[in-house]
Every structure is written in structure tokens, then in C-alpha cells.
Image (cartoon, rainbow, N blue to C red):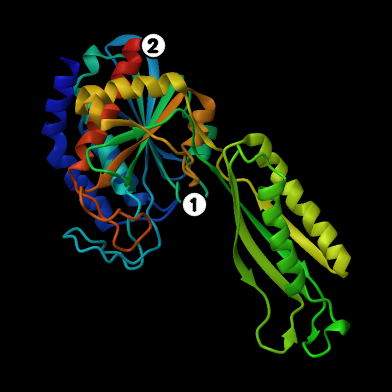
């Protein structure tokens, strides 16, 4: 009966959530600049009588649905920010803001969780416990989840579990994929500067060549992955930007390298920067150079809770059938700051396929990124179903 009601209410609110998605898509806002988006979210929540808090971590919004019966509190999360990309997708609701677009599905996440809020609010009298609706800024950059948590959103009432999802081009429409354990990696970043002594390329012995040192350092860093970490524990170290020198015959004074480190293991995560600096120290010293090193820890690895994954599989199967709910075989080396919620409480994060059957894979962060509005319906319905089933099962 609950599932049928969720399906009916999802269809009732479908046209409205599509309108909301299109509005957000046409007026994309970057990280911590989601002012109009957050106003829209808050207004939609208030329209249906949901309690609202605004201005959390700058532009974050929290809605609270108090169920008709006592129980636990579950959190549903959506991210709101867009990207600095000029849209090339041929859609009637194309971005009207030059150089900005929703190229990762966050417009759909925001609209979809608003749809879940509308469904759940209509069912609140039969809900055991409470539902917190978190609309966070800045998933694409520094992350809005942690500052929102730091400002107390996990309390009053205390949050017992969290649910998140992502519209995902790597899977076919109509499919939902979920896995227990590691789901997404910690996306740490680093900056290193090799300091040498510039000079004429024709008399290199009078210089200290930072280009040569940088090349040695980069090659040695790859040895951390291939020879110094357990091959059964995945690690990626990628040097993605190298800057040094301006012309053919001048050895520069400095070379700058930027890169990222991805892993699912917190012990390895803590050790990697020490290993990189060890290489920097010994290599630069051997050539008579020097270095500067800055390592920035971003989001932690996203780890799904086993019980929450089991619950999500059963819940979503009620909506779309077991044959359309898949165990995700591989984790993803992308980062996701929902990980901060998963560190605090048992959580599940799942992926909703958006690539049409027979079509090329929908590529995220691409100027032509696009997905069908119909995928919003399963997002809204699945979030509502998992939330209600959690509150009923873990009362």
C-alpha cells in the first residue's frame, strides 16, 4: 500500500518537479553562489508546509518533516551547484547564463529530492519519526556538506541515517546500482614546486635544472602506487599539470606540478603525502635543488553501510522490480562529499542510470550533458521509499 501511494504521489508532483528542474537548469549557479536556487528550494518547501532553515554554510537549506508518530530521523541530501562550462546541449531549457551549466545532474538531484519531500509530506501522518531534507552547496568544489554538519544540521532532531543518490551516465535508464563498502574515493589534491637555478640551456652544468628534477619526481611518485602500496588496495596518483619555462634555450628557475591522489583506505590516505615528500626531499637534494609541497585533504572516502545497502535494494525493488536493481561491481575513483554524512551515521548512496538504451554513454562534466526528465520520477519515488522503509524497520 505504501509503495502504491508513493507511485501515485510521485506522478501527482511529477510535472512540478520537472518545472523546477528546468528553472534551476536555466539559471545555474556555482559553488557557494546558489542564492536563487536556495530561495527556490526554500519557497517550494514552505508552499507545502515544511519547516525550513536557510543560510546554512552560506546557501544551504534544510527542511524538516515531522512524522505523525515518534521514531528516528533520516536525512535525504541533494547538491545544488553547477559548473563553469558553456552549454552545448540542444534542450529547450538550455542555460541562460554564459559559461555556466548543470553538467552533472545536480539540477535533477535538487528537483528530485524536492519531489521526495512533497511525497513524504503528504504521507507524514503515517510516518514514524522525522525526515531532514538537506540541500547543500558546493559539492563540485570545496564541499558544502562538512560546513553544514559543522553548523549543527545533524542535531535537533538527531539524525540516525542518511540517504543520497546520483543520476549517473555510466548506467542505463531504468536501472539502479548500489554497492556496500567503498563507493567513491577521497579526492585529495597537491601542489609541489621544484626550485632550481636557471641558466642557459647550452651550459646546463652551471644551472640546477628543475625540469629534470620534476621529471624524476613524477616518475618516482608513480612507484609509490606500483611498488609501495598493497595492490589489493587501490590508489591513484595523477600529476595533471606541469608549468615551467617559457622558451627553448632557457633553463627555468622553478617548475610547478599539480596533481590528485585517490584512495578508499584512510591509512593509505594518511601515508601518501609523507611518501611524496620523502621523494621530493631526497630527489631535490641529490640535484642540489629545493622544493615546496602543499597537500590538501578534501573529502574522505565514501563508504556505504551494509545494512543500509540491503534496505535500499529491497525498498527500490518494490518500485522498479528486483531485475532492475543491480549490485554495483566497482567503486568509483571520483570524489563525493556525501562521504561526510556517511562518516557520521549509517548511510547509503546509490546511482540512477540515465543513459538511454542503445545510446552512447552520457558523459558528466561535458558541454552536451543531458538526461531525460523521466529519471526524476524514480529519484523522487526511490528516496521516499527508502526513507519510509528505514523509519519503519529501524524504529
Residue named by callout 1: 141
Location of residue 256 with respect to 165 vertically, above or below: below
Residue 34 visible in the snapshot = yes
Identify which residue, 223 or 139, lies in the foreground: 223
Identify which residue, 393 or 31, lies in the foreground: 393
Q: Residue at x 20, y 19 (%)?
A: 123
Report the quarter where the N terminus lies.
top left
x, y percent for residue 263: 58, 42
**Comes first in the chain, label 2 or label 1:** 1
Q: Residue at x 62, y 46 (%)?
A: 297
What label sits on residue 394 in the rendered view? 2
Q: Image quadrant of residue 193?
A: bottom right
Q: Is residue 123 left or right of residue 52?
A: left
x, y percent for residue 191: 66, 59
Labels 2, 1: front one: 2
Q: In 3D space, how far apart are the residues under numbered discs 2 and 1 (Cα atoms)? A: 34 Å
Q: Is residue 224 left or right of residue 202?
A: left
Q: Secondary structure at mark 1?
A: loop
Q: Residue at x 12, y 33 (%)?
A: 11
Amino acid at each position: 500500500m505504501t509503495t502504491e501511494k508513493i507511485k501515485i504521489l510521485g506522478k501527482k508532483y511529477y510535472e512540478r518537479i520537472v518545472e523546477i528542474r528546468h528553472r534551476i537548469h536555466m539559471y545555474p549557479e556555482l559553488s557557494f553562489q546558489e542564492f536563487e536556487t536556495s530561495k527556490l528550494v526554500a519557497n517550494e518547501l514552505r508552499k507545502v508546509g515544511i519547516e525550513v532553515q536557510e543560510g546554512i554554510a552560506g546557501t544551504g537549506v534544510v527542511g524538516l518533516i515531522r512524522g505523525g508518530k515518534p521514531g528516528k530521523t533520516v536525512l535525504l541530501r541533494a547538491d545544488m551547484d553547477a559548473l563553469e562550462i558553456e552549454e552545448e546541449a540542444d534542450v529547450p531549457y538550455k542555460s541562460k547564463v554564459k559559461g555556466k551549466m548543470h553538467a552533472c545532474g545536480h539540477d535533477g538531484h535538487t528537483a528530485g529530492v524536492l519531489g521526495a519531500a512533497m511525497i513524504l509530506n503528504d504521507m507524514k501522518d503515517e510516518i514514524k519519526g522525522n525526515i531532514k531534507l538537506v540541500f547543500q552547496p558546493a559539492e563540485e568544489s570545496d564541499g558544502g556538506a562538512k560546513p553544514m554538519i559543522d553548523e549543527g544540521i545533524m542535531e535537533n532532531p538527531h539524525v540516525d541515517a542518511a540517504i543520497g543518490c546520483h543520476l549517473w551516465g555510466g548506467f542505463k535508464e531504468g536501472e539502479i546500482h548500489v554497492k556496500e563498502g567503498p563507493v567513491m574515493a577521497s579526492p585529495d589534491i597537491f601542489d609541489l614546486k621544484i626550485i632550481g637555478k636557471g641558466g642557459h640551456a647550452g651550459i646546463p652544468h652551471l644551472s640546477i635544472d628543475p625540469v629534470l628534477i620534476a621529471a624524476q619526481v613524477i616518475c618516482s611518485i608513480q612507484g609509490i602506487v606500483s611498488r609501495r602500496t598493497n595492490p589489493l588496495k587501490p590508489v591513484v596518483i595523477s600529476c595533471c599539470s606541469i608549468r615551467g619555462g617559457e622558451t627553448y634555450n632557457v633553463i627555468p628557475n622553478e617548475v610547478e606540478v599539480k596533481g590528485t591522489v585517490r584512495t578508499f583506505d584512510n591509512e593509505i590516505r594518511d601515508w601518501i603525502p609523507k611518501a611524496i615528500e620523502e621523494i621530493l626531499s631526497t630527489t631535490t637534494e641529490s640535484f642540489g635543488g629545493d622544493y615546496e609541497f602543499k597537500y590538501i585533504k578534501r573529502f574522505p572516502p565514501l563508504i556505504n553501510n551494509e545494512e543500509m545497502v540491503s534496505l535500499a535494494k529491497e525498498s527500490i525493488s518494490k518500485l522498479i522490480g528486483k531485475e532492475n536493481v543491480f549490485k554495483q561491481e566497482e567503486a568509483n575513483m571520483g570524489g563525493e562529499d556525501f562521504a561526510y554524512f556517511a562518516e557520521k551515521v549509517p548511510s547509503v548512496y546509490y546511482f540512477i542510470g540515465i543513459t538511454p538504451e542503445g545510446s552512447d554513454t552520457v558523459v558528466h562534466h561535458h558541454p552536451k550533458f543531458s538526461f531525460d526528465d523521466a529519471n526524476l520520477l524514480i529519484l523522487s519515488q526511490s528516496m521516499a521509499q527508502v526513507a519510509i522503509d528505514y523509519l519503519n524497520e529501524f524504529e
